[in-house]
Image: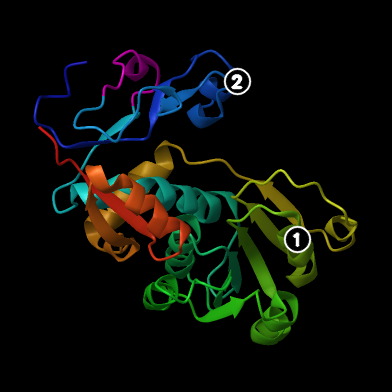
């Protein structure tokens, strides 16, 4: 590879190895490769001054790394993972049309990024379903970046509240950034006929309810995993043009030596994204 030079500012899509011969790789869906290894899982990963990305990956997956455009900071590029993830879930996987209503479950980084993408796609009402604690930091940022209504599932019935807000037009899309069974159950009640449910989050709890409404009202359940080359190309362009506000998601910057504090802030819902900077020799 000769197009990459020392000093070029780059961001990785977190892929360190794929087989290159499975159906997923042949289709360019490298995140779905059964043999995939990503930085930090299967390969030595970040949280260090330098990170080694095996050059072999670029022979198969030439877009495993991207040059960061001028005007986009390292910090913004560093949180492209949830942004690209949300972009693929909504802009590429769903059939959201401008003027429709969207319900986003979860107010972590994926949910917060989904709010921005839904706004870009022209959603009218963007409902965020969260829980107690989200009001500490996340609620204000969500409002500033596109959320129109907040539903506290700790004290409110999300189904009833969503129906009231969406009105006769109903909800055309639910973006599930939680992944639990109860969210799917509520989604089947909230969605209008021909509505879509994109499952971004994952949980292991089994289902204990009927899913007949999928057939009765022709609801589409869309599985989703990560991002692809199109996601990265377009999100970098959106960041560069100022149409995406990644900085709003960065609530804290800490030295690497305080990584534990960063995780504690996330667990306490006092942060959205924590940037760790290198502070060693």
- Tell me which segment is drawn in magenta: 52-62
Residue 10 versus residue 90 in the image, above or below:
above
- In the rendered structure, find residue 6 and report the number of the disc placed on it: none
Q: Earlier in the sequence, mark 2 or mark 1?
A: 2
Q: Secondary structure at mark 2?
A: helix
**Callout 2 crowding tier (Cα within 10 Å): few <14, some 14–19, many ≥20:** few
Q: How many marks?
A: 2
Say which residue appears at 21% left-offset and 42% top-offset: 68
Residue beneath disc 1 = 182
Alpha carbons under labels 2 and 1: distance apart = 33 Å
Instruction: Give the percent coordinates (x, y) of residue 272.
Output: 39, 61
**Toward the viewer: 248 or 88?**
248
Left or right of 42, for residue 225 = right
Say which residue appears at 43% left-offset and 60% top-offset: 113
**Callout 1 crowding tier (Cα within 10 Å): few <14, some 14–19, many ≥20:** some
Instruction: Give the percent coordinates (x, y) of residue 274.
Output: 32, 54
Nearest-to-viewer mark from 2 and 1? 1
- In the rendered structure, find residue 23 and report the number of the disc placed on it: 2
Chief secondary structure of the magenta portion: loop
Instruction: Give the percent coordinates (x, y) of residue 261.
Output: 33, 53
**Toward the viewer: 133 or 105?**
133
Q: Is residue 261 magenta?
A: no
Q: Is residue 61 magenta?
A: yes
């Amino acid at each position: 590879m000769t197009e990459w030079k020392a000093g070029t500012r780059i961001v990785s899509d977190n892929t360190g190895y794929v087989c290159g011969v499975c159906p997923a790789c042949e289709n360019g869906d490298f995140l779905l490769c059964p043999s995939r290894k990503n930085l930090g899982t299967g390969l030595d990963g970040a949280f260090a001054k330098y990170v080694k990305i095996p050059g072999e990956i670029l022979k198969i997956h030439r877009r495993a790394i991207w040059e960061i455009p001028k005007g986009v900071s390292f910090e913004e590029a560093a949180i492209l993972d949830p942004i690209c993830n949300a972009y693929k879930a909504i802009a590429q996987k769903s059939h959201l049309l401008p003027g429709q209503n969207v319900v986003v479950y979860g107010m972590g980084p994926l949910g917060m990024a989904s709010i921005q993408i839904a706004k870009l796609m022209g959603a009218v009402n963007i409902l965020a379903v969260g829980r107690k604690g989200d009001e500490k930091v996340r609620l204000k940022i969500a409002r500033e970046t596109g959320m129109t209504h907040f539903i506290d599932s700790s004290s409110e019935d999300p189904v009833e509240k969503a129906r009231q807000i969406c009105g006769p037009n109903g909800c055309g899309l639910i973006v599930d950034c939680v992944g639990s069974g109860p969210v799917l159950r509520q989604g089947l009640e909230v969605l209008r006929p021909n509505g879509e449910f994109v499952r971004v989050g994952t949980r292991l709890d089994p289902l204990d309810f009927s899913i007949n409404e999928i057939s009765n009202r022709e609801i589409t359940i869309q599985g989703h995993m990560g991002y692809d080359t199109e996601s990265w190309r377009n999100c970098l362009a959106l960041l560069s043009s100022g149409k995406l506000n990644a900085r709003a998601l960065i609530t804290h910057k800490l030295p690497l030596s305080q990584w534990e504090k960063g995780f504690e802030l996330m667990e306490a819902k006092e942060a959205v994204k924590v940037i760790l900077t290198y502070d060693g020799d």
